[in-house]
Image (cartoon, helix red, strand yellow):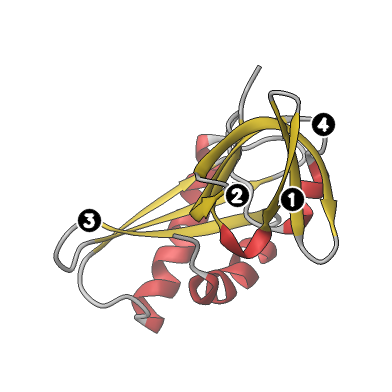
Amino acid sequence: MLDKNLEKLIAPVVKALGYELVGVVRLSQGGRNVLVRIYIDHPNGITLSDCEQVSYQVSGLLDVQNPIQGHYTLEVSSPGLDRPLFTLEHFRQFIGHKVKVRLTRPLKTRRHFTGLLQRVQAPQSVIVLVDGTEYSLPYDQIDKAHIVPD
């Protein structure tokens, strides 16, 4: 699940290091164990060294600020070919690409949509063409979305 509070805390550190913070996902791993996954990007791509640098700085910040109760595992990675889409700006950026979207609740009896991202439409809907039919997916009901690599 996207974690906006952690994102606000982490974003200045990632930006100061010269990277774009694509998103921060917080996943429960049972009990009090938490996985914090940070996606970063850069016009020149992301290397293992970039991930290590961000991990080191963010880990120090999380240790000092202590926003996570219990044990956590920190992962830092590039968005990859199956780039996650977190914001409306991400959807706008990838119009024309094939996407996979999962909604929090069914729309017309379905929650999963895989098709061509057509456009972002006011007031905050994402239009996806699936098997010749356009679906208007409410942005606030999108649970998870990512690019489907060719």
Distance CA(mark 1)–CA(mark 4): 12 Å
Point out the tag, 4 or 3, that comes first from the N-terminus: 3
* The one of 2 and 68 positioned closer to us in this rendering: 2
The answer to whether mark 4 and mark 3 are in CB contact below 8 A is: no
Q: Can you tell which mark lies on residue 40?
A: 2
Q: Amino acid at mark 2?
A: Ile
Tell me the distance, in whole angstroms, between the alpha carbons under discs 2 and 3: 22 Å
Q: Relative to residue 32, is residue 42 drawn left or right? A: right
Name the amino acid type tagged 3.
Gln
Residue 97 location, quadrant: top right
Q: Residue furthest left?
A: 31
Of the residues shown, which amino acid type is indicated by label 1?
Val
| The C terminus: image quadrant | top right
Q: In terms of depth relative to the viewer, which is nearer, 132 or 57?
A: 132
Asked if the residue at tag 4 contacts the one at tag 1, i.e. Cβ–Cβ closer than 8 Å, the answer is no
Q: Which residue is mark 3?
A: 29
**Outermost residue, front direction?**
108
